[in-house]
Amino acid sequence: CALRGGRVLVITPALVNAPARSFGSIIRSRELLWRLLVASQVFNEELTRRGGLLKVGLFNSELPVTNIPAKVLAVRRTLQQHQWLHDLFDFPPAVYTGLEELAAQYATVPFPVPDSTDFEYRRYPQLHMKANFMASREAWRVMAREDWVDFTRQYVPRRMAQVKSRGTAVQSFGENPEPLIDVGEDAVRRWYDELPVEQRARVVFFTLIGSANQNDRSFSSDGEIVIALSNWPAVIPYLDLLSIIGQSRWVETTDELDALLPRRAMVLTRVAHWFKAMF
């Protein structure tokens, strides 16, 4: 896809943020990321010539799941640190100012502290999100609109309601049953209607959310399923993905990769390959 001119960002959790830390999963994850990183270097000139992009990120965050304002600032900082991300999203300056104001607005709002005695407690957030967001070049232009600040203002308080204590979260959604899917609908539709007819035909949004594990047990007993969203609702998960992008480390060298996904002993690597081949 990148060699055909697509902009591709691949993200996997770092070791401390991995929900499954078995040596087989970690070894194969590292090998995949290593190959993608090397490919991005080997094909750098070709990617540049075709306008493509291939970047490898590792979700590496110590932020509590409940600290939504800190995640907003993390997005702001990450886009500042990487010029290619700044260019990719092409947000106008007002968006960055708006994000900072939004984070400051909620900075004094106390966020729930995870209970360390809870059975599901983890010191670091665990990324187990299996999602793909795809947009054509024409569709991607909507990302450069100032409206994203307003989208985020609508989104943040609802997201904060989701991460409250279980009982409070359930109660808050009982009192406010309106769906989240209406976030940004009017602005996206207005932008689409303003486009020339020939450009509208090339506006494509897709979001795939779900699990698609490629093993016999998952096929037969786990009920693997993927939900496909298209049209403007497919843009809504983009806000979650932007948060993940902002909390990720974008590696440029194999040394940086090794620091976040350390190599394992050769004997464990061979065992991991054997398990994959046998099962």
Image (cartoon, helix red, strand yellow):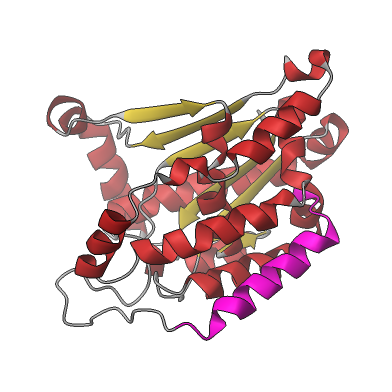
Identify whether 76 is placed above or below 1: below
* Residue 174 falls in image quadrant: bottom left
Residue at 83%, 29% (x, y): give it. 50
What residue do we see at 61% from left, 74% from top? 103
Q: Position of residue 12 (x, y in %)?
A: 47, 52
Quarter of the image where one finds residue 158: bottom left
Residue 34 in percent (x, y) is at 55, 50
Helix, strand or loop for the magenta stretch, by majority: helix
Residue 244 magenta-highlighted:
no
In percent of the image, x 19 and y 67: which residue is there? 167
Q: Quadrant of the C terminus?
A: top left
Does residue 238 show up?
yes
Magenta-colored span: 89-109
Q: Quadrant of residue 39?
A: top right
Q: Is residue 251 left or right of residue 229?
A: right
Specify the quadrant that holds the N terminus.
top right
